[in-house]
Image: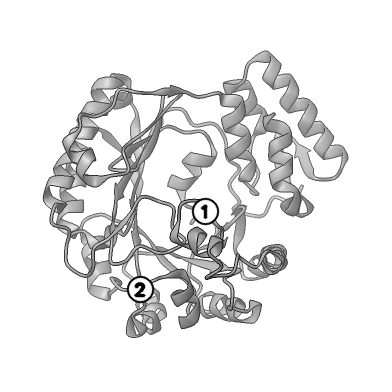
Amino acid sequence: MEILEKQTIWQVRNSYLGVYVHFPYCFKKCDYCDFYSEGIGAAPANDEKSLFKSYQKEIKDRISHFPEIQKRTIDTVFFGGGTPSKASPEHWKKLLDFLRSEFSFSDKPEISIEVNPEDLSSELLSEYHSIGINRVNVGVQTLEKKGLEFLGRHYDEDRYHSLVEILSHSPIQRVGIDLMYGIPGVSKESFFSDLSHFLKVGLPHLSLYSLTLEKGTQYSRDVSNQKKQEPEENLQSEILTQLPNLLKENGYLWYEVSNYAKPGFESLHNLKYWTYEPYLGIGPGAHGMIDGHRYGNPRNAGLYQKKETSTKYEKIDPSTELSLTLFRLFSPFRYLDFIETYLDTKSKSKYLKTIEGWEKKGLCTLENEIFQWNPQALLLLDDLILEISL
């Protein structure tokens, strides 16, 4: 097993808590996006102040439903959306202060925010830095105008051209971007040109996703009505298999199917989703997982603010959950640690038998109780995850 220097080996962590907060408003809702969001133009949301009050109320309610979570230490906070950079930094500061009044925080918590290119500026990054936000991810998707138009994204040419300059001089060191490939009309060469543009700066985190067709989105409707083409799947497979070596040559660790980071710059919050750690999901459309139970909030900002916090919690089947999340990791993890901690006897036996079968086929490596996928498992991953989840 080739475990690179400084590569983290993930393991069970039971005493920490993450917090995800969903801000649902955007300048314009993207055609491909299936997260709950509403396009409201350039002006601030009319209900921003009351929405942030509702966040505080929900946090209090979740604590009352699960009092034990206050004994956990918060080590990650993630402001997502929608477009959380559309909200006032002062409101995010007050929410962080409120969280600190309710929970203990680790010495060096990761506090992340998603930013859209139209909001990004040196002044905004300085403001975020001053209120304790220490990780920023920018949803670039593509630098090609026709690609952005295909996705139904707002495009501010000046902002897109200044991205590299602003990010390379950011007071926040943990910065990353999202890029998307397989957009009809955008060539493989164009995608790699965009990627090269950001590799030259050495940004510490890169999320590289394929465009997907999600039911209920405007893009899905446009494809059904033959107004737009489906994602270019053959092109996506080509790019997907070329990325690991290219990123490795540039000093990045491949730690999840679509995520690459310089050593120590992985998204610790997103790792909670993949390593079965508990997290609060706050806000309209948010989902959370606490003490082996999942819950979800209404996908409507007005309804979220008016309704009482739901007490409906769904018990999780750890066997299914681990298969769908843990095995998306391409960095090494202590598989026996997870199996022994979370699975019953029957599930343990099934997992071990399936994993040993993968090893015999050369799909993964097992050494010193550590699991790691081999690169050839990549294009088979969905089928392999299905195999262990059934």
Q: Residue 237 appears at what percent x and percent y?
A: 71, 63
Q: Residues within 10 Å of mark 1 (few under 14, many from 20)?
A: some
**Tag 1: residue type?**
Glu
**Which residue is located at x 23 percent, y 39 percent?**
304
Q: Nearer the viewer, residue 168 or 115?
A: 115
**Which residue is located at x 60 percent, y 65 percent?**
230
Q: Nearer the viewer, residue 116 or 203?
A: 116
Could you give the CA–CA distance between mark 2 and mark 1, rounded to whole angstroms? 20 Å
Q: Quadrant of residue 337?
A: top right
As drawn, the label of residue 154 is: 2
Tell me, yes or no, if residue 155 can be seen here. yes
Residue linked to disc 1: 214
**Tag 2: residue type?**
His
Q: Mark 2 vs mark 1: give the one in front.
A: 1
User: Is residue 333 positioned above or below 221 on the image?
Assistant: above
Q: Secondary structure at mark 2?
A: loop
Precedes in sequence: disc 2 or disc 1: 2
